[in-house]
Image (spheres, grey):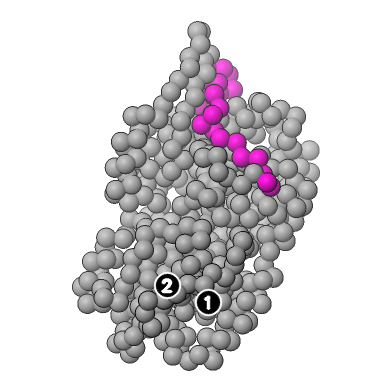
């Protein structure tokens, strides 16, 4: 299995989903070797063997690697594609670049080179994607005869999966957690789109995290419908699910938690918040996360004159997320396009009522969440107002939501993925 991140070192829901799925697969009797660009040594290896790509020498110059390099050489130059990085993070990434590469070369036309991946989403992302493909080929060589299926998560790892398939002949399953249409709307990055399409086309089977994503894969990428299966995500919290958190204020707290990017719709949260504050002054709004829209959102909050009611926490992880939910009265996910969305499930598990956009995959599986169109600021503001003003309404969503989300287990999702593996193995024979 190839992924770009694994807890506790994550940038969003991708790593969380990979962790939950691998735990479920382990319980289903599947042995998973999870290859990640950069491992830190503190990953949970009880259910999965985490393999650090930065510790692997890749073989260059032979026929197989030459073919792979021909496929990916158009993305080996530095790129300013930084889907999750802020300006400060981008600058730090550039400074670290000078220490990243180290090679161990042998004589002749074939040599080995070790590449120290950052494992991040910075300026050098495209080169890392290409280098990761070489690692995919090397891992397949080393584990020959020891694995049955290759599973690649999101476009960053598709070429690694394709390379492993090229070397081993084993079936490839690609997992779509988000598409370029989700991240960029109609202004898609053609390089990323081409990688996504190549991965889906090369795969024996495709897993989409929702029926919404399944339709995009079929209609936008031209992938045969019979090759695509929707498997919804699930939710889990490690250890103590409910953390007692003391508030320093008596105000109600409404929270947005996610990347502050176009896809997540943070501007709609701000505009709705301004409408709520005209009706109820004793409310505070929290925007937890980071992203390329952060500065513009802060400026908009200031222009609306509601800065004293807004709190920006930066990126939260692990127990920080649980503590934020423990402090919240309402959770809002106004995403413009959300393939699934695990955070509403985490909020519901923490006894927080949720408001989600109808344009999210998680809306397919939730009955006890308030659903609005992301662009309908009035409806969003009304939903916020209703949940903080009428305790009986909030209590109903908390009680029913807790029952609903408790039934969504990664073990069940893993069993569906195992069926996809079996289908891919049969198709490859």
Disc 1 marks which residue?
352
Q: Position of residue 93 (x, y in %)?
A: 34, 40
- Please give the name of the residue rendered at 36% of the width and 59% of the height, measured from the top-left corner: 314
Q: Which mark is residue 255?
A: 2
Q: Quadrant of residue 201?
A: top right
Q: Is residue 399 left or right of residue 12?
A: right
Quarter of the rendering occupied by the C terminus: top right
- Which residue is at the front of the view, 273 or 151? 273
Q: Quick check: can you spot residue 52?
A: yes
Q: Position of residue 242 (x, y in %)?
A: 57, 70
Q: Is residue 124 left or right of residue 361?
A: left
- Please give the name of the residue rendered at 36% of the width and 49% of the height, measured from the top-left corner: 85
Q: Position of residue 118 (x, y in %)?
A: 43, 38
Q: Position of residue 346 (x, y in %)?
A: 56, 67
Question: Could you tell me which secondary element the residue under label 1 belongs to?
Answer: loop
Quarter of the rendering occupied by the N terminus: top right
- Which residue is at the front of the view, 183 or 324? 324
Q: Earlier in the sequence, mark 1 or mark 2?
A: 2
Counting the numbered discs, the total is 2
Q: Residue furthest top?
A: 107
Question: Could you tell me which secondary element the residue under label 2 belongs to?
Answer: strand
Residue 57 magenta? yes
Q: Are marks 1 and 2 in contact (CB under 8 Å)?
A: yes
Stretch of the chain drawn in magenta: 46-72
Distance from the alpha carbon under mark 1 to that under mark 2: 10 Å
Q: Is residue 157 above or below residue 83?
A: above
């Amino acid at each position: 299995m190839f992924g770009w991140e694994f807890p506790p070192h994550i940038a969003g829901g991708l790593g969380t989903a990979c962790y939950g799925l691998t735990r479920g697969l382990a319980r289903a009797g599947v042995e998973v070797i999870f290859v990640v660009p950069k491992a830190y040594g503190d990953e949970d290896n009880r259910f999965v063997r985490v393999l650090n790509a930065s510790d692997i020498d890749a073989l260059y110059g032979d026929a197989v690697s030459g073919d792979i390099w021909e496929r990916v050489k158009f993305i080996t130059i530095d790129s300013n594609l930084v889907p999750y990085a802020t300006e400060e993070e981008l600058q730090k990434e550039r400074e670290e670049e000078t220490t990243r590469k180290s090679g161990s070369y042998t004589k002749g036309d074939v040599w080995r080179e070790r590449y120290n991946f950052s494992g991040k989403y910075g300026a050098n992302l495209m080169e890392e994607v290409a280098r990761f493909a070489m690692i995919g080929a090397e891992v397949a060589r080393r584990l020959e005869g020891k694995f049955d299926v290759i599973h690649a998560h999101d476009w960053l790892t598709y070429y690694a999966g394709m390379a492993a398939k090229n070397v081993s002949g084993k079936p490839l399953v690609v997992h779509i957690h988000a598409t370029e249409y989700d991240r960029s709307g109609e202004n898609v990055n053609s390089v990323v789109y081409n990688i996504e399409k190549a991965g889906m086309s090369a795969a024996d089977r495709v897993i989409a995290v929702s029926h919404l994503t399944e339709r995009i894969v079929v209609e936008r990428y031209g992938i045969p419908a019979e090759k695509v299966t929707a498997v919804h995500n699930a939710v889990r919290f490690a250890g103590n699910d409910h953390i007692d958190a003391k508030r320093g204020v008596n105000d109600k707290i409404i929270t947005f938690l996610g990347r502050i990017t176009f896809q997540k719709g943070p501007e709609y949260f701000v505009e709705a918040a301004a409408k709520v504050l005209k009706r109820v002054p004793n409310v505070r709004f929290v925007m937890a996360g980071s992203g390329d829209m952060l500065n513009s959102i802060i400026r908009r909050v200031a222009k609306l004159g509601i800065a004293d009611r807004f709190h920006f926490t930066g990126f939260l992880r692990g127990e920080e997320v649980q503590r934020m939910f423990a402090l919240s009265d309402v959770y809002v996910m106004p995403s413009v396009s959300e393939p699934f969305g695990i955070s509403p499930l985490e909020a519901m598990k923490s006894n927080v009522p949720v408001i989600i956009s109808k344009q999210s995959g998680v809306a397919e599986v939730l009955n006890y969440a308030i659903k609005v169109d992301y662009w309908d600021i009035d409806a969003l503001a009304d939903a916020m107002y209703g949940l903080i003003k009428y305790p009986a309404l909030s209590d109903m969503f908390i009680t029913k939501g807790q029952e609903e989300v408790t039934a969504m287990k990664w073990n069940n999702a893993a069993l569906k993925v195992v069926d996809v593996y079996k289908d891919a193995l049969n198709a490859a024979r």
